[in-house]
Structure formats: structure tokens, C-alpha cells
Image (cartoon, helix red, strand yellow):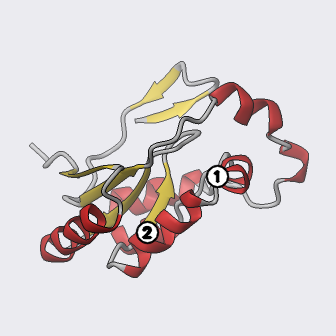
């Protein structure tokens, strides 16, 4: 779904390609209020190109979609919690075609086109981040 406004306007998008998603939630708590209070919109120079990303979804261009992922809330959350940058690097270094913090954090995810790479990254993440919640799932398959 495309969420607009303050999240109240939802528009259905085409189904994503079948992708594997590795989620890692560190053992920290992030205050959404803190993140939004400290967000400096006038200092953000890079914004998501939503129309381009929607086009990537329509064309099933997963690699370009993954490279275009962005979350302006990372400008607040990552400096406050550097482990999130480490998790993004871990995911990218372990085969993810893209990685991003979800919402205001702290869950971070990586997208995988290849199940074997995703499962290898899952195993390594569980070994390296034993105190974190680590979960592998898949985007919904088209009906």
C-alpha cells in the first residue's frame, strides 16, 4: 500500500515480487515521539522518489527498488543508535539487495532475491546477534 498524508490515505499497489525479508530487532527501545521531535525536515537533502519506486514495483525491478529504499527518520535514529547502521551494513554485507530501518526503528530489514543467501544470513545473524529478535519471512506471493 502507498501511505500518504499522515498515514490515513492508503492506495493499493501491485504485488511485490516474491522476496525474502530478514528482520533484525535489537534489544533497544526507540521513542517515536523523540524521533519526530528531533527530525529536521529543512535539513534533509534526500527524499524518497516515491513515483520511481512505484514504477519499480510495477516492473518487478527488485534490484533498483532495493537500491532506492530510503527512510528520512534514519537521520535521527541512526546517530542516536549506531547499532542500526551496523545492522544495515551486516545485511548488505550478507547478500541483501537493500537494507533499511523500518519506520522510526529499531527493527532493520534486508531484502533478498535468493532464498539460500537469505537463510545463510539468517544463520549468521542468529549467531552474531543472539540477544536480538531475528526473523526471516517472505513477501506475499501474488495470487
Q: Are marks 1 and 2 in contact (CB under 8 Å)?
A: no
**Percent position (x, y) of residue 113?**
24, 71
User: Dot 2, crowdedness within 10 Å: few (<14), some or many (≥20)?
Assistant: many
The quadrant of the image that shows the N terminus is: top left
Against 80, residue 85 (above or below) is below
User: Mark 2 sits on what residue?
Assistant: 98
Q: Which of the pair 72/80 is nearer the observer?
A: 80
Label whose residue precedes the other's in the sequence (1 or 2): 1
Q: In the image, 114: left or right of 79?
A: left
The picture quadrant where one finds residue 37 is top right
Q: In the image, 73: left or right of 138?
A: right
**Percent position (x, y) of residue 109?**
40, 56
Q: Residue at x 61, y 51 (%)?
A: 71
Q: In the image, 119: left or right of 76?
A: left
Instruction: Give the mark toward the camera: 1 or 2.
Output: 1
Q: Can you name the residue that lies furthest to the right here?
A: 42
Q: Residue at x 14, y 47 (%)?
A: 142
Q: Can you name the residue that lies furthest to the front here?
A: 131
Does residue 87 appear anywhere in the picture? yes
Disc 1/disc 2 C-alpha distance (Å) = 20 Å
Against 91, residue 109 (above or below) is above
Q: Residue at x 52, y 41 (%)?
A: 28
**Percent position (x, y) of residue 122?**
22, 65
Q: Which of the pair 17/138 is nearer the observer?
A: 138
User: Dot 1, crowdedness within 10 Å: few (<14), some or many (≥20)?
Assistant: some
Against 31, residue 129 (above or below) is below
Residue 81's tag is 1
Amino acid at each position: 500500500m502507498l501511505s500518504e498524508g499522515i498515514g490515513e490515505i492508503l492506495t493499493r499497489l501491485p504485488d511485490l515480487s516474491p522476496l525474502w525479508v530478514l528482520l533484525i530487532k535489537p534489544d533497544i527501545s526507540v521513542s517515536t515521539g523523540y524521533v519526530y521531535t528531533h527530525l529536521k525536515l529543512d535539513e534533509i537533502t534526500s527524499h524518497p522518489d516515491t513515483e520511481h519506486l512505484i514504477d519499480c514495483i510495477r516492473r518487478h525491478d527488485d534490484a533498483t527498488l532495493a537500491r532506492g529504499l530510503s527512510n528520512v527518520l534514519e537521520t535521527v535514529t541512526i546517530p542516536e543508535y549506531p547499532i542500526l547502521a551496523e545492522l544495515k551494513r551486516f545485511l548488505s554485507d550478507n547478500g541483501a539487495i537493500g537494507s533499511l530501518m523500518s519506520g522510526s526503528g529499531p527493527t532493520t530489514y534486508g531484502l533478498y532475491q535468493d532464498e539460500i543467501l537469505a537463510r545463510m544470513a539468517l544463520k549468521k545473524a542468529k549467531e552474531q546477534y543472539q540477544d536480538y529478535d531475528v526473523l526471516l519471512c517472505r513477501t506475499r506471493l501474488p495470487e
